[in-house]
Amino acid sequence: MAKRYVIVGGDAAGMSAASQIRRQDPEGEILVFEKEGVISYAQCGLPYWIGGVVAERKKLIARTAEEFYTRYNIDVKLYHEVTQIIPQKKQIRVYRREEKDEITVPYDVLLIGTGSAAIVPPWEGRNLPGVFTLKTMGDAEKLLSWLETHTPNKAVVIGGGYIGLETAEALHNRGFKVTVLDLAPQLIPTFDSVIAEIAQDVLKRHGVEIHLNEEVVGLEGDEKGVRAVVTKNDSFPADLVIISIGVRPASELAREAGIELGPRNAILVNERLQTNIPDIFAAGDCATHFHRIKNAPDYVPLGTTANKQGRIAGINMAGGDAKFAGIVGTAIVKVFDRTIARSGLGERECQALGLPYQTVSIKARPISHYYPWEDEVLTIRLHFNKDNRKLLGGQIAGGAGVDKRIDVLAAALFHGMTIDDLQALDLAYAPPYNSVWDPLQQAATVAQREK
């Protein structure tokens, strides 16, 4: 008898798992329940669609539900919202939005891939016309549809994280006067303040206003639309507001089913992506992510991790034995003509964990000193353990070459290298691409001098 695999959520983790299950079990029945009308799309590309860099919605969609069915015999049920998981009976309850009824579906193995949800505080005025989040394809469609019939010119982005900064740039490119508000004393608080200030300077240079230490208390407006964002200190005129203060794991279904939760209420999983309840797996933005540097479960929701976890969960659901190797917290973001990136632990994380860390910080050209270069030099910060010299993390800001160095650093962190090991790496060199000593190796040399 064919095994029935049920997947809750049709985005990165869910569809990666479904694809892998089909490879492992050609005869199994695979059912995917998705509460929205689209699956398998690039959430990270939404700001670029809003800003016009990506011209069409379809370019963000990897495969449609129809393609999954015809090519892989994976049955995707759109507009089907799972409302309850009943582990004792190995059943789920599903609300069919178009039929307006509820059905019960049995499973042999279940994956929870419900992702994350945008955090929206209970501010007065949060539901005014012209106020949006930008987390899902549906959010982006609502915003673009609204812009077809409205002509705002003052946009306020609440939140200075990755998506907030990308959205600020997108709206600036559309011709809006953009203001970014953040409760914290710096933008992108996962970065060291030195790197965050570089991003802030770039935004200001392009005409984006930045206001930090601003606690939003509400939004003002009427049935015609939002007019202002009100903070404890001030009021900021706005006829378009994007709330982008972060996400939370969509783990309510799991919690109500008695599944154990971990950091930030994400679903706690082991290295095989199993929960504490037999035959129930979880993956992606709703689940925990083992952090190799912290040596503990963490919550760092990123599309790359969701795809990896989904693949591993799918293999194990079909009887295989794959293990999730963990993350080191690598991230990168474009801020107009600059790039900032990080991997491993930042300075505040090192302090919070009580680690005996040391920091080396340099500025360096990413190519040979004699080769023509008009771009900005790289700012590099590396943190390492003073006792055993092991790398703890690093951050880089600049123009060309940031992505290359952060990936080298991520590989070094993944494999537990010391800061001194960086000098021994055999990295590519030609004058247009590097100097004989890569900037990371230059930073390692400085660290050796400071022994």
Image (cartoon, rainbow, N blue to C red):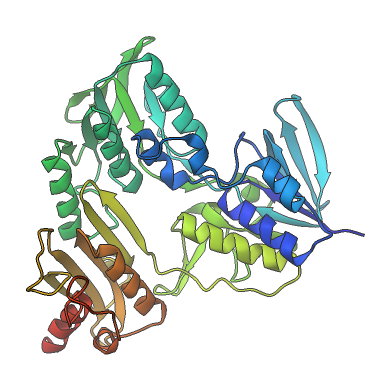
Instruction: Name the quarter where the N terminus is drawn.
Output: bottom right
Q: Nearer the viewer, residue 60 or 275?
A: 60
**Residue at image point 57% right, 62% down:** 309
Q: Position of residue 118 (x, y in %)?
A: 45, 40
Q: Quadrant of residue 146?
A: top left
**Residue at image point 61% right, 35% down:** 36
- Tell me if residue 136 can be seen: yes
Apparent side of residue 226 relative to residue 100 in the rendered image (left or right): left
Q: Quadrant of residue 191?
A: bottom left
**Residue at image point 46% right, 59% down:** 299
Q: Position of residue 23 (x, y in %)?
A: 72, 64
Instruction: Name the quarter where the C terminus is drawn.
Output: bottom left
* Outermost residue, right side: 1
**Residue at image point 19% right, 70% down:** 432
Apparent side of residue 90 relative to residue 204 in the rendered image (left or right): right
Q: Nearer the viewer, residue 39 or 323?
A: 39
Apparent side of residue 6 relative to residue 267 in the rendered image (left or right): right
Apparent side of residue 358 relative to residue 320 in the rendered image (left or right): left
